[in-house]
Image (tube, rainbow, N blue to C red):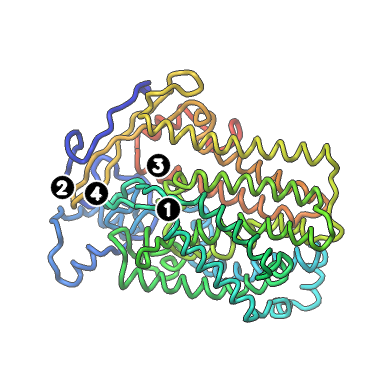
Amino acid sequence: GRPRVLAPQRSQRGEGAKRRPASPTPPEFAPQETHEAMVETRANRRKSLGHASKASSPQRSRSDTKNLKSGGDLHWSGAKKGGARGSSLLANLVSTGGVLALIATTPFIAIIVWHLFVNLDGSLVALVAAFKKDGLQLIPKIWPHTSPRAWRLLGAYAGFEAFLQLCLPGKRFEATTTANGNVPVYKANGVQALLVTVAAFFACWHFGLTTPTEVHTLFGEMLAAMVVVSFVFCIFLLIKGHVAPTDQDSGSCGNIIYDFWWGMELYPKLGPLNIKQFTNCRFGMMAWALLPIVFACHQYQRDGYLADSVLVCVALMCVYNFKFFLWETGYFNSMDIQHDRAGYYICWGCLVWVPSVYASPALYVASVQPPVTLGAPVALAIFVAGVVSIWINYDSDRQRQEFRACGGKDPVWGKKPVIVEAEYQVLMNEEWVTKKSILLASGWWGIARHFHYLPELTASFFWTAPALFGKLPPYLYVIFLTILLVDRALRDDTRCSLKYGKYWKEYCKLVPYRIIPGVF
């Protein structure tokens, strides 16, 4: 039928929620396609050890069993199976061998990116020539040896951020209940942590504890250290997921390589420390917020003035990262946190890839000599275009959050919103509970299903544009982000299709494009 333009009543765990006994597949939402291998969960382990299960569930039909053996993903959330990994474009393309290749090569790529921008002025020709001359022996030649000083700076940063995450005041924030009935709880103190971190850096510089030039000089060494530390940390997370998972949102897919890559636990903790909030937000994103400022100060120290190319690039990154921490509670409900588990893909990526690749445009413009000069008109035009992109990205996320908060009752862009009233199922107390959700098909979200990715891409282009267009490597982050967001849009569409079934098809008819209207 056609979508109803109304605000649906939100069902609660008690009255209004339809309950079904736990079964392998919620009968109304069985998927039509196969997506991943069966995941062993704690409930399955209890059964294999001969322990009584917490609740009985009907036996699987032959078709269910066949689907499991062939790699069926029986529920959008992965409830009772270890969680939703989704059907990743990257995963489908590369399979286990490709995942191994990514794990084996990304640490070296992170160091090569640093070397390319700091030592080769971003020249791809020079990098290719170096590889032609030395082959793979170039990698150990350029690999930085981490000095004790670099270790101390790195340890001080990590410890300081963990302290801020735990000790700074912040409002209690409860994210969306998982399909296994767990409610993730966070302390929302991102903006406070950002301001304290930046202030602490300038205080350290003022009191002679470190300098921007020292951090810039030792950045490669710290990056090399994080490559190793983060790899070991991901092994620890793999073992922890098998031995001592934090909650029921944990499990194995039966393939140790994928368990290492995608992760075992959805919301792991070390004591009171939320691991994903630390790796993603306090270490990775905070490093991206701080490093461009440090690089800009280094360029100022080196040249005696702040180049306009550096100013525009770093200013846009600062605006974007302030927006991120202002919106951090929204991030806690994003795919990175809600559906991607704590493994190499997310945790190593945030600990190493984010400081290396995400901050690379600022590293390039601050390292190249002489620095690029834009001129006031060009600099202003790029800055304004970048700020507009960041604002649209923020406003689209805000629009969706406010729409959900009011239950669809408030107008969107001055009009009554178009809403698809959907149902989905979650597992609560070993019972399938039917819940309701509302999908917005108005405002920014009437343009494309993942519209907020488009201004994010344009923002990344504009803060890289101060590098101008003579070299391709400075645009590495833009290229990477395009691949990442396309993959994420495809995975999210697959997950939503499994979650909402016919309601998602109805929504896709209203909003046919994923990111770029009329194109994709």
Question: Viewed as shown, does residue 265 lie left or right of 471?
Answer: left
Residue 19 visible in the shown view:
yes
Label 1 sits on residue = 169
Dot 4 falls on a residue whose secondary structure is strand
Residue 122 visible in the shown view:
no
Q: Residue furthest top?
A: 415
Three-letter code for the amino acid on which mark 1 is drawn? Pro
x and y percent of residue 427 in the render? Answer: 24, 49
Quarter of the figure with residue 150? bottom right
Number of the label disc, if any, that sits on residue 21: 2
Quadrant where the N terminus sits is top left
Number of the label disc, if any, that sits on residue 427: 4
Three-letter code for the amino acid on which mark 3 is drawn? Cys
Q: Earlier in the sequence, mark 3 or mark 4?
A: 4
Question: Viewed as shown, does residue 106 lie left or right of 438?
Answer: right
Q: Marks 4/2: CA distance?
A: 9 Å
Q: Earlier in the sequence, mark 4 or mark 2?
A: 2
x and y percent of residue 233 in the render? Answer: 47, 72
x and y percent of residue 209 in the render? Answer: 65, 70
Label 3 sits on residue = 496
User: Which residue occupies 78% across, 59% down?
Assistant: 299
Dot 3 falls on a residue whose secondary structure is helix
Three-letter code for the amino acid on which mark 2 is drawn? Pro
Q: Marks 2/1: CA distance?
A: 42 Å
Q: Marks 2/3: CA distance?
A: 23 Å
Dot 2 falls on a residue whose secondary structure is strand
